[in-house]
């Protein structure tokens, strides 16, 4: 089996339920951090957790990105109502949150059984069985079959290449060293919308990050300028093709592995830097979010993080990656509510590929996938990005 590429967050309802609950915790933690920053009464800052990390980040960037920090403070709402000290309903669960308590939002949500009932079925676990005596998952020994089961369990919104398991794969000549996501071109279908401030040339910047959970690879794509578009329909070929992120395939651990990337575009203006702002915010809170997602995924097989090594179970690492991909998508959507003049919304973020082994080829038994297109929109503006994945030997 050659690798399968995909776009979008998982559509598996069990995975989305966990992602939704994790994100609500992140959202309310961000609100508590901004409440503290803005001296909102009856709010204190815990000495650990997401809100402490978020507060430290926002405090640090209050000077060099005051606009983004102040606007983020108005984003975390339920309906149009702030949550300060209240009993609220999240996904049918009554959660009593006290922003003045020493406990974090996560600790309070856990105590009120907010995460109870979140389960992963055997189907979502790619038909893996938990061996209580051996304290391990029992999975298919055939990596190709297992990779295909993982892909079906995740049910990504758009599968860009569906392999036929009946066709044997030709082994690669040698183990690949790295996997690269390459950006080939960007086309301005429509440069601007109807707003007066949008008339003129569009200077487009790009950035984001990549994630592979099993081998703990979180790689940042430093923000860079692509091109200044002067007319609608203009197509800019990125020469040479830009390596957006690269993953090390030589790291020890089991296979299959799922690689994901979040690609963001922004109109570069005097208040620019929002891609880097998002990237740095995620760096501040990401470890805690990954820990929470991992705990919930491991609970689905009746194990704790300490009982097993995450890197030993590809499906758990992949599920955690899918949860994080969804949470990142939600976080971008949250920021877009306020920063919509700056960040283009990719409808199917993230993009990714799954490799069954280090000597797997990519789609079509090749070292390189076909070129795919991701659509970015901002009001009436629309850009098309061409990209592909490539193995480096």
Image: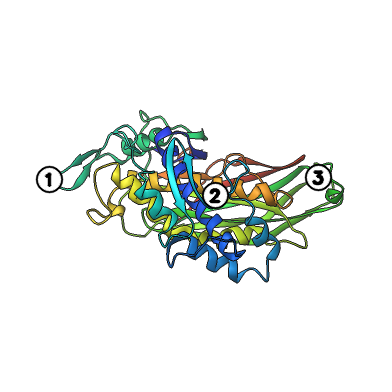
Which of the two marks, 2 or 3, is nearer to us in this view? 2
In primary-sequence order, the first of circles 2 and 3 is 2
Measure the alpha-carbon separation of dots 1 and 2: 45 Å
Which of the two marks, 1 or 2, is nearer to us in this view? 2
Measure the alpha-carbon separation of dots 3 and 1: 61 Å
In primary-sequence order, the first of circles 3 and 1 is 1
Who's the residue at 48% across and 37% down the image? 364
Which type of secondary structure does the marked residue at label 3 adopt?
A: loop
Whether residue 181 is situated above or below residue 143 in the rendered picture: below
Q: Position of residue 293 (x, y in %)?
A: 39, 49
Which type of secondary structure does the marked residue at label 1 adopt?
A: loop
Viewer-side residue, 257 vs 85: 85
Q: Identify the mark at residue 282; answer none if there is no mark.
A: none
Residue pointed to by mark 3: 192
Residue pointed to by mark 2: 83
Viewer-side residue, 130 vs 152: 130
Viewport quadrant of the N terminus = top left
């Amino acid at each position: 089996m050659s690798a399968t590429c995909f776009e979008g967050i998982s559509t598996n309802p069990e995975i989305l339920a966990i992602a939704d609950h994790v994100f609500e915790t992140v959202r309310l933690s961000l609100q508590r951090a901004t409440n503290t920053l803005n001296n909102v009464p009856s709010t204190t800052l815990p000495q650990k957790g997401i809100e402490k990390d978020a507060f430290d980040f926002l405090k640090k960037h209050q000077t060099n990105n005051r606009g983004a920090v102040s606007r983020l403070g108005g984003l975390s709402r339920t309906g149009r109502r702030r949550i300060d000290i209240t009993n609220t309903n999240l996904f049918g669960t009554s959660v009593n949150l006290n922003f003045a308590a020493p406990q974090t939002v996560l600790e309070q949500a856990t105590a009120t059984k907010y995460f109870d009932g979140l389960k992963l079925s055997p189907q979502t676990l790619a038909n893996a069985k938990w061996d209580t005596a051996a304290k391990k998952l029992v999975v298919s020994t055939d990596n190709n079959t297992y990779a295909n089961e993982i892909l079906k369990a995740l049910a990504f919104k758009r599968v860009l290449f569906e392999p036929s398991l009946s066709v044997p794969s030709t082994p690669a000549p040698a183990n690949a060293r790295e996997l690269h996501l390459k950006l080939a071109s960007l086309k301005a279908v429509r440069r601007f919308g109807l707003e007066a401030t949008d008339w003129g040339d569009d200077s487009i910047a790009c950035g984001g990050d990549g994630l592979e959970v099993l081998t703990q690879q979180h790689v940042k794509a430093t923000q860079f300028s692509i091109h200044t578009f002067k007319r609608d329909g203009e197509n800019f070929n990125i020469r040479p093709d830009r390596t957006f992120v690269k993953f090390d395939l030589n790291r020890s651990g089991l296979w299959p592995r799922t690689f994901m990337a979040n690609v963001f575009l922004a109109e570069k203006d005097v208040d620019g830097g929002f891609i880097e702002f998002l990237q740095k915010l995620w760096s501040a809170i990401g470890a805690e979010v990954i820990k929470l997602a991992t705990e919930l995924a491991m609970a689905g097989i009746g194990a704790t993080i300490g009982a097993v090594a995450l890197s030993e179970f590809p499906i758990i690492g992949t599920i955690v990656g899918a949860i994080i991909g969804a949470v990142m998508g939600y976080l971008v959507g949250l920021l877009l509510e306020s920063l919509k003049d700056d960040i283009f919304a990719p409808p199917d973020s993230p993009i990714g590929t799954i490799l069954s082994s280090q000597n797997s080829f990519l789609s079509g038994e090749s070292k390189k996938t076909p070129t795919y297109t991701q659509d970015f929109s901002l009001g009436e503006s629309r850009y098309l990005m061409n990209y592909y994945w490539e193995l480096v030997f």
